[in-house]
Amino acid sequence: MKTVFSETHTLRDAKTELYGGELVYPFERPSRMTYILDRLKAVDPGPILPPGDHGLAPILRIHDAGLVDFLQTAWDEWQAEGYEGEAIATCWPARRMTQRRPDHIDGKLGYYALATETSLTPGTWDAAYGSAQVALTAADLIRAGERSAFALCRPPGHHAAFDMYGGYCFLNNAAIAAQRFLDNGAARVAILDVDFHHGNGTQDIFYDRSDVLFLSLHGEPENAFPHFLGYADETGTGAGEGFTVNHPMPPGTPFSEWRRSLDAALDRIAQYAPDHLIVSLGVDTFETDPISFFKLKSPDFTTYGGDIARLGLPTLFVMEGGYDIAEIGLNTVNVIEGFLG
Ligand code: SP5
Ligand code: ZN
């Protein structure tokens, strides 16, 4: 399996994440990639390639032009205001308030942010752009006939919605890749999101569509970020009714339970018979992940990689979360190895 990877991810190196009332060094940090690359090189499932540049057009197939413009200009506006720290939203268009976009950077941050833990920094846009290019290039490998490919994306993407960023995500790499498949002739694409967190952004983008089946296995919103989406009764709307599938699970969920949800999701994917499968691959389901509460062990990642392979679909893996950095390489590459069999 070929991996696509870009060094531009290092341009995203935020110093601050608002966590537990303190500004801490972010869980989503550049060294995550070092550990995954080291393990990839040790196991060597295939070559590691740089992305091509597909420009902004495929990004704008998925995202609001206002969000894309904001991500490109927010840092300059923040600096022009004379602020000393990284750019963090402090107010929101909450219940019974207007949804108009303000002019001031403080207002715009609240308008486009869905969470406050994700600071904007000088290199964030360039890194997010590069991450989307990684996903697009890996999608094109599959279109060219590869059975599978690994988009080693950073920053991750699945929390980024049509017009919102947050949850360490700015552009929705998996959604951008899915649209790429459709624009190049695919009729149906399934996105299976196995990151610990609900893929609220991906769900948002495809909620009213039947050409993308979205399925997510995640920590229940009552107890896990992003808290305000991901309930089992969210099933799609209009033409998309029945094409969103959520499997929320409670704290302490072991692999045996998690795998039951996976089996149900895989059955639904088989019934949908997509041209391509995209796996939003977060390994924050690991038992010692510092911000999550599932109990998967390292060999379980190999097992479920094999489960996914049995669908027999051309499969694009897109990297999402995973914050037990010492084990992120092992767990991520275990999924790849399990898939390859
Ligand atoms: C891509 C991805 O995995 N994004 C996750 C973003 C989560 N950010 C909010 C984390 C809040 C964690 N609260 C954990 C409580 C542990 N005591
Ligand atoms: Zn996650």
Image: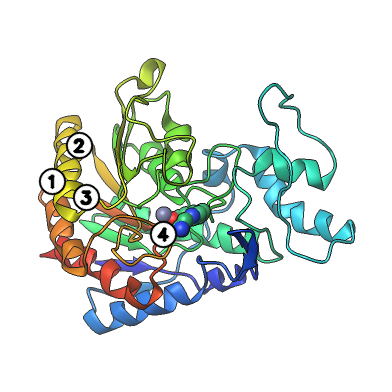
Estimate the x, y position of residue 7 in percent, counting from the top left.
51, 74
Q: Amino acid at mark 3?
A: Pro
Nearest to N terminus: mark 3 or mark 4: 3
Nearest to N terminus: mark 2 or mark 1: 2
Which disc is residue 106 wearing? none
- Residue extending furthest toward the top: 238
Residue at mark 2: 269
Q: Is mark 4 within 8 Å of ligand 1?
A: yes
Of the pair 133 and 287, the residue shown nearer to us? 287
- Rounded to the nearest whole Å, what is the CA distance between mark 3 and mark 1? 9 Å
Q: Amino acid at mark 1?
A: Leu
- Rounded to the nearest whole Å, what is the CA distance between mark 2 and mark 1? 8 Å
- Rounded to the nearest whole Å, what is the CA distance between mark 3 and mark 4? 22 Å
Q: Amino acid at mark 2?
A: Ile
Q: Residue at x 34, y 19 (%)?
A: 241
Residue at mark 3: 314
Nearest to N terminus: mark 2 or mark 3: 2
User: Can residue 260 be seen?
Assistant: yes
Of the pair 117 and 37, the residue shown nearer to us? 117
Q: Residue at x 52, y 39 (%)?
A: 62
Residue at mark 4: 321
SS state under label 4: loop
108 relative to 309 in the view: left or right? right
Estimate the x, y position of residue 53 in percent, counting from the top left.
53, 60
Q: Estimate how packed mark 4 is, as few (under 14), some (14 to 19) or many (20 or more) residues with alpha carbons within 10 Å.
A: many
